[in-house]
Image (tube, rainbow, N blue to C red):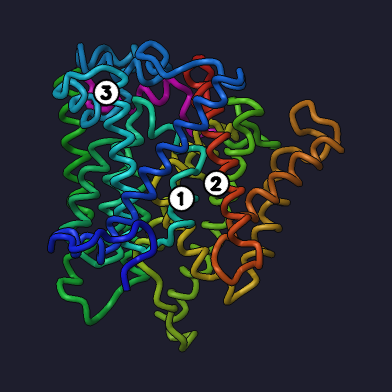
């Protein structure tokens, strides 16, 4: 059966019939529709004065974008400047292409949509699920001259390789991800976790999976250190710049907070919730695997996609890294977690659990309460009064719960919930882009 979407033309050529039957036509249409609607929403809000800036070359060079452009034009500089905190693949690609901020933003947006199409094909996302996944507000970082757009498409390749147990594709995706961002520290434990818990005695080349992945990450790390040494004279320049930005090990201070401000706090809170739920899932699955290995438990682990296991490990590592290396400041956690394809895979796995089980709803509600308490609810949340804090986290909980009820069978109003959630996300994404263009830090 062909997928729902655009009708096939009469007497189409053979290549179109194959393209249409594979579902590519539907995915391309939906992603093009998403971009068109996003542009329409932004321009409508601009006309009504609700957003105040159009994307220009000057506005798109906010914050890290300008540092990336500086590397692309001038190369790396003294470690004290801070430019060499970024890995080279993206700025060197920008240099090679020779385009301006608008041109590179269009390319990165295209990369993100290609990554989303790969995820949709790999995990068989429905149209609603695909639109919700690509409208996560943090994905605004994939539309501007940051490395997130490039990282998204490479991460999608990595996840497809893991899900299909395709070792060459996994290694290629991993290599490109680690050349684009400093991801090795987070990928290493996630990959080991995914490989150990998904061991399959019938899989060909199973003995190669773990050492091959470790070899790729080790080779990338050595290569980056060599590049930094040649360019700056300091092989550990990346880590020294991180320390300069106060990204050093510090005990978290409670209540947690986000230096990005109240506009971003709720997104950072969503990422914190994903961290904690992923950590619980990793602990449960890891304990189950270990007890089965020791023959204490006879029942083996349920079959879980290797991509899901990797995403759980990545989310756990990312969240705790941010908390432990920023002293409880959650700034950047939404960007490093929600603006990645790993968040989309975790959403997909959550949708597989619905409506067969109801415990995810209880887990999410309990997690939202834990996040609220960690952020100072009800008396120490920013400058909020207790009733204001209760309203804030009530809306936050409803927003998170909406993601559980957009699949068929989860609610009689799943279509309306999915549509409403998608439109809310588009408006928030437009607002965040407006803030970015105004040189306001989003984290």
Of residues 96 and 47, the one nearer the viewer is 47
Dot 1 and dot 2 residues touching (CB under 8 Å): yes
Q: Quadrant of the N terminus?
A: bottom left
Residue hosting label 1: 131
In the displayed orientation, state which residue is furthest to the bottom. 298
Point out the tag, 1 or 3, that comes first from the N-terminus: 3
Residue 422 appears in the rendering: yes
Element at label 3 = helix
Element at label 1 = helix
Question: Is 89 on the left or on the right of 355, as rendered?
Answer: left
x and y percent of residue 397 in the render? 70, 50
Q: CA distance from mark 1 to mark 3?
A: 24 Å
Residue interval drawn in magenta: 232-250
- Mark 1 is surrounded, within 10 Å at the Cα level, by few (under 14), some (14 to 19) or many (20 or more) other residues, namely many
Question: Is 31 on the left or on the right of 131, as rendered?
Answer: left
Residue hosting label 2: 422
x and y percent of residue 293 in the render? 40, 80
Of residues 56 and 328, the one nearer the viewer is 56
Residue hosting label 3: 103
């Amino acid at each position: 059966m062909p997928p729902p979407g655009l009708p096939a033309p009469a007497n189409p050529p053979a290549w179109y019939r194959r393209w249409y039957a594979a579902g590519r036509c539907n995915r391309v249409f939906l992603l093009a529709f998403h971009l068109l609607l996003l542009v329409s929403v932004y321009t409508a809000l601009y006309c009504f004065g609700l957003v105040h800036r159009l994307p220009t070359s000057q506005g798109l060079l906010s914050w890290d974008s300008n540092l990336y452009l500086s590397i692309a034009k001038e190369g790396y500089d003294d470690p004290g400047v801070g430019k060499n905190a970024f890995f080279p693949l993206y700025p060197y690609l920008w240099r090679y292409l020779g385009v301006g901020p608008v041109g590179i933003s269009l390319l990165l947006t295209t990369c993100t949509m290609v990554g989303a199409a790969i995820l949709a094909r790999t995990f068989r996302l429905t149209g609603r699920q695909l639109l919700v996944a690509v409208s996560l507000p943090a994905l605004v970082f994939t539309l501007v001259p940051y490395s997130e757009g490039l990282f998204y498409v490479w991460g999608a390749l990595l996840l497809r390789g893991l899900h299909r147990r395709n070792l060459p594709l996994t290694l290629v995706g991993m290599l490109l991800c680690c050349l684009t961002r400093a991801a090795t520290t987070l990928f290493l434990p996630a990959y080991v976790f995914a490989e150990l818990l998904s061991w399959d005695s019938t899989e060909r080349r199973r003995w190669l999976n773990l050492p091959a992945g470790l070899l790729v990450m080790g080779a990338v790390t050595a290569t980056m250190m060599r590049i930094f040494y040649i360019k700056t004279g300091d092989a550990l320049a990346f880590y020294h710049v991180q320390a300069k930005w106060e990204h050093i090990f510090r005990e978290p201070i409670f209540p947690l907070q986000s230096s990005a401000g109240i506009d971003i706090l709720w997104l950072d809170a969503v990422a914190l919730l994903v961290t904690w739920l992923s950590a619980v899932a990793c602990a449960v699955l890891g304990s189950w695997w270990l007890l089965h290995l020791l023959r204490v438990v006879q029942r083996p682990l349920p079959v879980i996609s290797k991509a899901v296991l990797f995403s759980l490990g990545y989310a756990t590592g990312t969240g705790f890294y941010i908390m432990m290396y920023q002293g409880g400041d959650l700034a950047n956690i939404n960007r490093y977690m929600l603006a990645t394809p790993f968040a989309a895979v975790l959403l997909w796995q959550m949708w597989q659990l619905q409506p067969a089980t109801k415990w995810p709803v209880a887990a999410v509600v309990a997690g939202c309460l834990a996040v609220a308490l960690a952020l100072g609810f009800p008396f120490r949340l920013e400058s909020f009064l207790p009733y204001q804090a209760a309203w804030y986290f009530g809306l936050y909980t409803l927003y998170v719960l909406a993601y559980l009820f957009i699949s068929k069978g989860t609610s009689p109003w799943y279509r309306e919930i999915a549509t409403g959630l998608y439109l809310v996300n588009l408006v928030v994404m437009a607002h965040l882009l407006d803030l970015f263009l105004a040189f306001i830090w989003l984290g």
